[in-house]
């Protein structure tokens, strides 16, 4: 996918790409740092159909929404040829017994045979987190294991 970067003197930078249906989707980053999500009009790709201003936390949340499924899809594709191996993602809900606790405290691998391979937090991926990794509410935990192991892992994380 080609992303076009356009410098707009006095304004900032626009980064955008074309979708399969011909729309242009992009982000305008202003010189002061605030960002806008841009979606072109379907009939005129040079005209803005929708413009949404986003705060930094909203940008992070949108990145998480768009990025986490891609990570899981990639892991699923990589494990598709391995019989008996599955991948899932489980959010850490506020009030979870593991909110604020470490990965080591879950004893996930020992108790389930499943492995936590990544945690997505605010748009950032922590790949292969160590036993000292501390969970927070809204973390998205990516786990690989057998179907039964994944069920046990969900039960542990969800309490």
Image (tube, grey):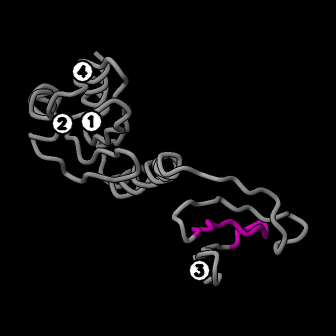
Q: Tell me the tag on residue 10.
A: none
Q: Is residue 61 left or right of residue 140?
A: right
Circles 3 and 1, Cβ within 8 Å, touching? The answer is no
Front position in the image: 157 or 36: 36
Locate the C terminus by quadrant: top left
Vertical comparison of 114 with 66: above or below: above
Vertical comparison of 83 with 111: above or below: below
Vertical comparison of 116 with 150: above or below: below
Check disc 2: other Cα within 10 Å, few if <14, some if 14-19, many if 20+.
some
Q: Tell me the tag on residue 134.
A: 2
Instruction: Point out the frontmost of discs 3 and 1.
Output: 3
Q: Is residue 56 left or right of residue 109?
A: right
Mark nearer the N terminus (1 vs 4): 1
Q: Secondary structure at mark 3?
A: loop
Instruction: Point out the frontmost of discs 2 and 4.
Output: 2
Give coordinates of residue 91: x percent, y percent.
Answer: 38, 32
Vertical comparison of 6 with 127: above or below: below
Q: CA distance from mark 3 to mark 1?
A: 37 Å
Residue receiving disc 1: 146
Residue receiving disc 3: 2
């Amino acid at each position: 996918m080609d992303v076009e970067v356009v410098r707009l003197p006095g304004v900032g930078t626009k980064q955008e790409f074309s979708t399969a249906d011909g729309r242009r989707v992009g982000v305008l980053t202003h010189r002061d740092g605030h960002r806008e999500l841009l979606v072109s009009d379907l009939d005129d790709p040079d005209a803005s159909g929708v413009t949404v201003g986003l705060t930094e936390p909203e940008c992070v949340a949108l990145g998480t929404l768009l990025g986490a499924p891609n990570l899981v899809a990639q892991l699923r594709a990589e494990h598709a040829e391995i019989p008996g191996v599955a991948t899932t993602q489980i959010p850490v809900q506020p009030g979870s017994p593991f909110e604020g606790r470490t990965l080591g405290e879950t004893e996930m691998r020992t108790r389930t045979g499943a492995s936590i391979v990544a945690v997505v937090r605010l748009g950032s991926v922590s790949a292969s987190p160590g036993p000292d990794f501390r969970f927070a509410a809204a973390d998205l935990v990516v786990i690989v294991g057998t179907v039964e192991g994944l069920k046990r892992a969900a039960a542990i994380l969800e309490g």
